[in-house]
Amino acid sequence: MPKRTEHRRDPSDVEITRFELMRIFDGDEEWLHTLEHNFFCGDCHVPNRRLINYRVMVTPLNDIALQGTCSGCNTIAARYVETGEDPEKVKRIQAVLRERKKG
Ligand SMILES: [Zn+2]
């Protein structure tokens, strides 16, 4: 199955900054590091590949999608995180989105 060449853009997703992501992760750089190294990338099995140049999207379900490029094969790759299942993270996501609206 050929890989897509562009990320799907859902207009109901909200793009946030890496700084805001860190707020949601409560400063857990280790976790982000793990996510950057564990993502699905078709048949690509390049060792130590990493998700790079990614945008951070929040979905209407309060989940987070890191949409970027695989450093191993240079095609698009993404990591989906089901933060919507964690009430603490949902609280922080909602706080970030609220403050965004205030501008
Ligand atoms: Zn790859």
Image (cartoon, rainbow, N blue to C red):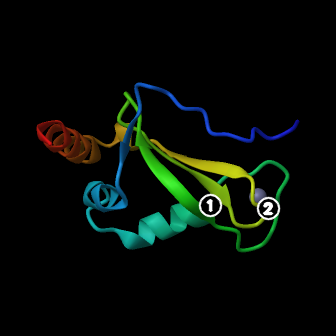
Which of the pair 44/31 is nearer the observer? Answer: 44
Q: Which amino acid does label 1 sit on?
A: Asn
Left/right placement of residue 97 relative to residue 39 reads: left
Residue found at x 43% / y 72%: 30
Query: What is the number of the mark on residue 73?
Result: 2
Q: How many angstroms separate mark 1 from mark 2 (CA)? A: 15 Å
From the viewer's side, name the closer residue of 39 and 97: 97
Dot placed on the residue nearer the N-terminal end, 1 or 2 = 1
Which quadrant does the N terminus fall into? top right
| Label 2 SS | loop
Mark 2 CB near ligand 1 (8 Å cut): yes
Q: In which quarter of the image is ligand 1?
A: bottom right
The quadrant where residue 64 appears: top left
Please rate how many residues cluster around mark 1, counting C-alpha atoms within 10 Å: few if below 14, some from 14 to 19, many from 20: some
What residue is shown with label 1?
38
Q: In this view, does 79 lie above or below 5?
A: below
The number of callouts visible is: 2
Residue at x 62% of width, y 39% of height: 7
Instruction: Assess disc 2: are there few (<14), some (14-19) or many (≥20) residues with their C-alpha within 10 Å of its C-alpha.
Output: some
Rendered location of residue 85, percent (x, y): 37, 38
Residue drawn 65% across and 56% down? 69
- The image shows residue 103, relative to residue 12, as above or below, that is below
**CB at mark 1 closer than 8 A to ligand 1?**
no
Residue at position x 80%, y 48% in the image:
42
Q: What percent of the width, then of the height, locates residue 49?
A: 70, 69
Q: Nearer the viewer, mark 1 or mark 2?
A: 2
For the residue labelled by badge 1, is the local secondary structure a helix, a strand or a loop?
loop
Looking at the image, which residue sits at the far left?
102
Where residue 61 sits in the image (x, y, percent)? Answer: 38, 29
